[in-house]
Image (spheres, rainbow, N blue to C red):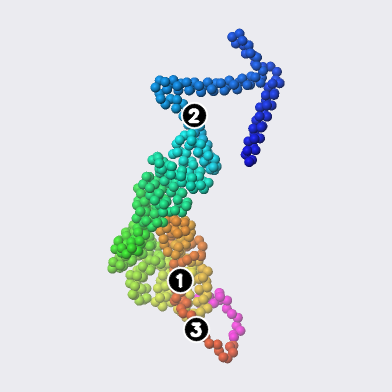
């Protein structure tokens, strides 16, 4: 409405300006006198202006007629397409002008204007492989999925634009959440251009989301061949995919093949904790405890982790707690000052009921890095040494609000996972989980509840109420800090 009013006002303003200019010219004295071949013509100012405009129009018409005449002459001399080319040049000129306007409108965010200009360019040019691209992008921008899909499908007919059409449909299906169709389209796009980096990344992510680990390894190898991935990063990620492939094989009861795949994944990346744990269990299943211990010791040297300790314990599952402490020395002596090593030895000594040794292993961890796990272990030590229930409850109360310690954290979105996964369930990042302290203290923990049965035990039976009156000591109650200091002494 406002634009129509504005156009009407502009029209009236132009008419008024022309009328005013004509009036000024008519009132102006003088003019133009033309004398030629015995003839003389005198033109006033207004007549001279009109004659100038008519002369410009006549020259333009003359040029067009000359062009048409030349085309007719060429046609008569044997060029059968001369006249059609003459008229097509004009259409093509206007068509490319409309296409240029469509692209400028699309770049400036005017999607509807871009669609209108693209439709005009299509009528004039008859080249859908060019105009459909602008139409598809504009329709996607305004959320018209049906028109966008139709425009992308038009591009599939031309071999030169088929790859662009497939990628456009793939992105459209991804936006709709149809990952199954998007995966098939990504595979077709990858077959057309296997070195296209963005297509490789999308296909790898979709294959990992669909648990197609074998296909993902092939895509990862293509990225390496194309030079889009450093060899050390490829080796690490290929090990991750091999590990998941082994897990799938294990689920399908193909135990022999799964064990070999797990061992291969560990050899490719020895510092990958899940691969080391699975490879160790594979060696244990083969009856090769020495190889399992060697794998775990090498991984422990890179980074101590509770999963490695759990796998190391499975090497001799029936041993006594005292024997386990002695056997674990071959593992814990590798990195004795590490926090995980100290916590592990404290837990082993608690299981062996050597509470003074467990307290020595803990050292100053409860003050320098008071995590929920460290405070829970201290509660177990206090219970084992016969401390009052109030002291044990004090440690547990602190553990409830303490940081959880290192966990599997996604380095892309900081989401916390209770178990390692190749793909982050929150952001979909591939190989982004790292064992580290999260930025926030809340979230699940893989190790915070193992000691609770030992600490809490079974609920005590309520004591019967005494028949005689109870005399209460009127001494002042101790504060929690005083209780903790007394427990520490």
Which residue appears at 48% of the width and 75% of the height? 379
As drawn, 423 above or below 131: below
Residue contact at pointers 3 and 1, CB within 8 angstroms: no
Residue denoted by label 1:
449
Depth order, front residue of 57/168:
57
The mark that comes first in sequence, 3 or 1, is 1
Q: Is 339 situated left or right of 256 in this image?
A: right
Query: Residue at coordinates 49% horizontally, 82% vertically from top-left?
Result: 460
Residue beneath label 3, please?
A: 461
For the record, the magenta segment spans 472-489
Alpha carbon of mark 3 to alpha carbon of mark 2: how far? Answer: 100 Å
The label nearer to you, 3 versus 2, is 2
Q: Where is residue 15 in the image (x, y as percent from the top left)?
A: 66, 29
* First of labels 1, 2 by sequence position: 2
Q: Name which of mark 3 and mark 2 comes first in the sequence.
A: 2
Q: Residues within 10 Å of mark 3 (few under 14, many from 20)?
A: few
Instruction: Tell me the element at label 1.
Output: loop
Circle number at residue 360: none
Left or right side of 79 for 93: right
> Residue 25, image x and y in percent?
68, 22
Label 1 vs label 2: CA separation?
A: 80 Å
Cβ–Cβ under 8 Å for marks 1 and 2? no
Queried whether the magenta region covers residue 226, the answer comes back as: no
What residue is pinned by disc 2?
A: 90
Say which element carries label 3: loop
């Amino acid at each position: 409405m406002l634009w129509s009013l504005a156009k009407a006002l502009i029209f009236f303003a132009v008419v008024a300006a022309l009328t005013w200019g004509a009036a000024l010219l008519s009132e102006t004295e003088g003019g133009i006198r033309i004398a030629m071949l015995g003839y003389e013509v005198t033109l006033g100012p207004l007549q001279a202006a009109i004659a100038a405009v008519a002369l410009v129009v006549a020259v333009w018409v003359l040029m067009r007629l000359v062009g048409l005449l030349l085309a007719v002459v060429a046609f008569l001399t044997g060029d059968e397409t001369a006249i059609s080319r003459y008229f097509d040049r004009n259409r093509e000129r206007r068509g490319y002008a409309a296409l240029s306007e469509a692209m400028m409108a699309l770049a400036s965010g005017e999607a509807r204007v871009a669609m209108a200009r693209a439709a005009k360019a299509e009528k004039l040019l008859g080249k859908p492989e060019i105009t459909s691209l602008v139409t598809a992008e504009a329709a996607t921008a305004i959320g018209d999925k049906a028109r966008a899909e139709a425009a992308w499908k038009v591009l599939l007919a031309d071999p030169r634009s088929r790859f662009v059409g497939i990628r456009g449909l793939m992105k459209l299906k991804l936006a709709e959440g149809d990952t199954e169709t998007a995966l098939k389209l990504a595979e077709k796009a990858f077959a057309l251009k296997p070195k296209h980096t963005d297509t490789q990344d999308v296909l790898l992510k979709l294959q990992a989301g669909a648990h197609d680990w074998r296909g993902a390894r092939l895509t990862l190898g293509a990225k390496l061949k194309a030079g889009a991935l450093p060899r050390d990063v490829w080796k690490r990620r290929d090990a991750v995919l091999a590990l998941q492939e082994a897990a799938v094989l294990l689920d399908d009861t193909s135990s022999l093949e799964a064990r070999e795949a797990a061992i291969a994944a560990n050899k490719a990346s020895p510092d990958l904790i899940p691969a080391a744990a699975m490879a160790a269990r594979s060696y244990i299943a083969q009856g090769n405890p020495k190889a399992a211990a060697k794998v775990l010791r090498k991984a422990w040297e890179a980074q101590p982790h509770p999963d490695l300790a759990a796998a190391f314990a499975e090497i001799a599952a029936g041993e006594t707690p005292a024997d386990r402490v002695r056997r674990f020395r071959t593992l814990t002596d590798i990195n004795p000052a590490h926090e995980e090593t100290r916590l592990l030895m404290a837990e082993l000594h608690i299981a062996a009921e050597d509470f003074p040794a467990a307290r020595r292993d803990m050292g100053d961890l409860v003050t320098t890095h008071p995590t929920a796990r460290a405070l829970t272990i201290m509660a177990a030590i206090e219970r084992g040494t016969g401390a009052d229930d109030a002291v044990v409850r004090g440690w547990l109360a602190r553990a409830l609000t303490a940081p959880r310690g290192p966990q599997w954290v996604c380095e892309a979105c900081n989401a916390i996972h209770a178990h390692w996964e190749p793909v982050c369930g929150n952001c979909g990042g591939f190989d982004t989980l790292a064992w580290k302290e999260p930025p926030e203290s809340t979230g699940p923990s893989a190790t915070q509840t193992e000691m609770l049965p030992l600490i809490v035990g079974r609920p005590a039976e309520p004591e019967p109420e005494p028949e005689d009156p109870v005399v209460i000591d009127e001494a002042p109650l101790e504060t929690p800090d005083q209780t903790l200091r007394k427990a520490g002494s």
